[in-house]
Amino acid sequence: MQVLSWNTQWCLGLDGLVDPRRVIAHALSLADADVLCLQEIAIHYPGLEGAPGDQVAQIREALPAGWQVFFGAAVDEFTAVGRQRFGNLVATRLPVLQVAHHRLPYPHDGGVRSMPRCCTVVTVMDARLGPVRVMCTHLEYFSQRQRMAQALALRALQIEALGQAGAPPLPASDGSPQQTKPHTLHAVLCGDFNFEPHEPDYARLAAPWSMGEEGAMAAGQWHDGWRLLHPDQPQPPTFRLFDRQWGPEPGACDFFWVSDSLRSHVAHWAVDSDTQLSDHQPVLLRLD
């Protein structure tokens, strides 16, 4: 199973061109991906550079037959120009079992530029691994307070999901909304986290939890996919390689995290350090 994650910057290349079709074509050229997790997808934002239109529709048209597209709007508002949405998109060619959109914490941080954030979760069925929760997110950039709260929420989401898998609700096959759900231990969390490995937000997301913490049924943690394969090497940069308006040096802020159950399945991690179709680089994870 191969998952590609990419903050597309609303498909704005460093050449100033906004083109979702070339972003999808490039993503699919990098690997025989099963799932694409894209951040910063826009619908109807004439005020952004390149004036993106309905990028969800454009991406759906650009994908091969058989792919499904799920969009989670972190921002969904009605303004003078009409309805505007901005968020994360998960596309997959695997069978889909369940979809959820989680609004992440948005504590006040007066005077600091910010926007709401969310995590889109698509549970897919992999032929070998079984059900896998693929979680796509993009955390706050300007507000460290909000970003930390969001990192803690992603910990809590995993603890909650593991609890449901370990102690599932009463089975039901009556066709109602309470019918049995595909609870699974397997999860992949990816996206642009807007923190780097040396920062406290990273440490809190990576920190192990103990049995009983926030209702956890067992000890566990999120595992950084790169570090599982290369524990003694710094992750290659994924941001500011070519565009330095957000800082003087390249940095790593786009990650793949996996559940305890998938730790031994992480087989390959790669970044495309050449493309300039966004201000971030696409990252690929393969689970065997």
Image (cartoon, rainbow, N blue to C red):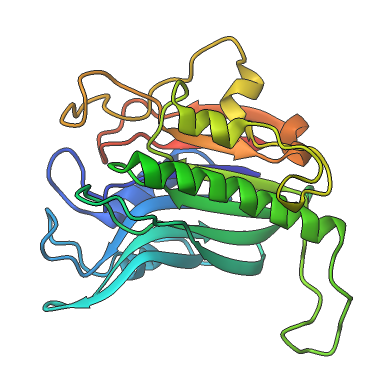
The residue sitting at 69% across, 32% down in the picture is 208
- Which residue is at the far top? 232
The residue sitting at 66% across, 55% down in the picture is 133
For the image shown, how many numbered marks are present on the structure? 0
The residue sitting at 89% across, 75% down in the picture is 170
Would residue 135 appear left or right of 187 to someone viewing this image?
Answer: left
Residue 259 in sight from this viewpoint? yes
Q: Is residue 180 above or below residue 202?
A: below
Image position, residue 50 (x, y; %): 12, 55
The residue sitting at 39% across, 66% down in the picture is 73
Which part of the image, by quadrant, shows the N terminus?
Answer: top right
Image position, residue 179 (x, y; %): 79, 81
In this view, the residue in front, 145 or 280, is 145
Would residue 204 appear left or right of 59 to someone viewing this image?
Answer: right
Q: Is residue 233 above or below residue 109?
A: above
Residue 126 in sight from this viewpoint? no
Q: Is residue 284 above or below residue 86?
A: above
Image position, residue 41 (x, y; %): 32, 58
In this view, the residue in front, 27 or 194, is 194
